[in-house]
Amino acid sequence: MYSHRFNIDIHITRHARERMASRNITESELLELIEQGTEKYKDDIRFWIARHFENRQDNLLSVAAVLEEKLVVKTVMHHFEWENE
């Protein structure tokens, strides 16, 4: 998988794939989330991306990621809420 937004390959960890399976999140939804979601950085390399999907009841979907030599998706969340909002 490749992100045109970040111009880098995407690596999905085993943990993130397990979360995707348990939450019925497809790879195409994950890619849409990464490419079009709102991002908030914790520091220079760690961040979250979140996006609302009209056809899902468990919004907001989000990933926690690390930007290294690849974009590493650490986990995938649903019913996400931004802190301090």
Image: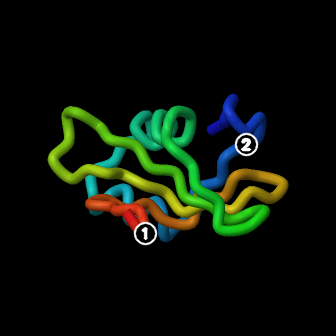
Q: How many angstroms separate mark 2 from mark 1 (CA)?
A: 28 Å
Determine whether, in the image, residue 16 is placed left or right of residue 73: left
Q: Quadrant of residue 34?
A: top right
Q: Do callouts 2 and 1 mark residues in contact (Cβ within 8 Å)?
A: no
Q: Which residue is mark 1?
A: 83
Give above or below for 54 relative to 21. Answer: above
- The numbered disc on residue 9 is 2
Tag count: 2
- Asked whether, in this view, residue 81 is left or right of residue 17, the answer is left
**Mark 2: amino acid:** Asp
User: Which quarter of the figure is the C terminus placed in?
Assistant: bottom left
Residue at image location 33% in from the left, 57% down from the top: 21
Q: Nearer the viewer, mark 2 or mark 1?
A: 1
The residue under the point 40% across, 43% down is 51
Residue 75 in the image: state x and y as whole percent: 49, 65
User: What residue appears at the point 15 percent right and 47 percent down from the top-left corner?
Assistant: 57
Q: Position of residue 23 (x, y in %)?
A: 27, 58
- Outermost residue toward the right in this view: 69
Q: Secondary structure at mark 2?
A: strand
SS under mark 1: loop
Say which amino acid is labelled 1. Glu
Quick one: label 1, few (<14), some, or many (20+) residues within 10 Å?
few
Answer left or right for 5 relative to 19. right
